[in-house]
Amino acid sequence: MQTIRINPDDDARIYETVGQRINRELTDGKRVTWLVCGGSNIPLIVKAMDLVDPSLTNDLTIMLTDERFGVPGHADSNWTQLDDAGFQPHQASVIRTLQPELTMEDTCNVYAQELLRATGEADIVIAHFGIGGDGHIAGILPGTEASRMDGDGDPLVTGYDGGAFMRVTMTPKAWQLLDVAYACAFGDTKHQAIERLVSQDIAIEDQPSQLLKRLDEAYLFTDAPVHADI
């Protein structure tokens, strides 16, 4: 995992890095699956997408790392917030997590099938994550059942009551499907979590963002006062 310390105002460095990487892979003729998150990263994702050549997007598939369960289009949905922020996928294949009249269980099963298909058909799988002050990543909260789904018999996607939201999220097991991750964490409330992530090896159950270290290629953008590789 490479740690890149930047000022939060220098967000262009993040979305340009992500957008140009996707553009480069598509230009090279690769099929790209891009997993995106919600929350404070939405503006970065919208701007990264704006840098992708629309004529290349037929080979791009986009889906969420996690979603807030409910009826399609509900106000707290990550997809709804991406749409409201002006996200323009052009000709990309967009896989939406929430489908009409599906239960939580069926939503997880269908999304797991789509995740396996989309990553299996891709030449490269790129994911974009935020990290919470408690060390959570995607919808995987520390100490929850989702944080322990890491074995051979565990699902790729799970749903559970996360307190503020009913969550649908890829599990730790699903990280084996990823090739590249870009993660962002800014603000004083996240500095302690990032210091622990960078300097300590902690169980996934206790700090799910440690999953970034499993990947051969992972980049962490942060303003936390930690050692930076770049």
Image (cartoon, rainbow, N blue to C red):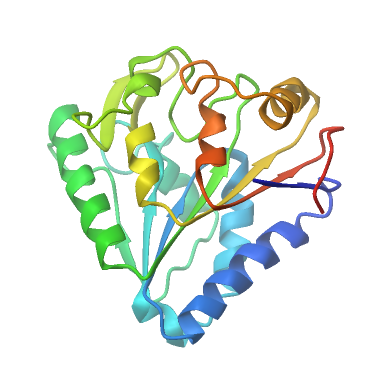
Quadrant in the rendering for residue 171: top left
**In the rendered image, the vertical position of residue 224 relative to residue 175, given as above or below:** above
Please state if 52 lies on the left or on the right of 227 as rendered.
left
The residue sitting at 31% across, 59% down in the picture is 119
> In the rendering, at what x and y percent does residue 33 appear?
38, 63
Please state if 34 lies on the left or on the right of 199 as rendered.
left
Camera-nearest residue between 98 and 211 = 211
> In the rendering, at what x and y percent does residue 152 appear?
23, 32
**In the rendered image, the vertical position of residue 25 relative to residue 115, given as above or below:** below
**In the rendered image, the vertical position of residue 167 relative to residue 186, given as above or below:** above
Please state if 38 lies on the left or on the right of 193 as rendered.
left
Q: Is residue 99 visible?
A: no
The residue sitting at 77% across, 26% down in the picture is 191
**In the rendered image, the vertical position of residue 115 relative to residue 134, given as above or below:** below
> In the rendering, at what x and y percent does residue 163 appear?
42, 13
Q: Is residue 172 visible?
A: yes
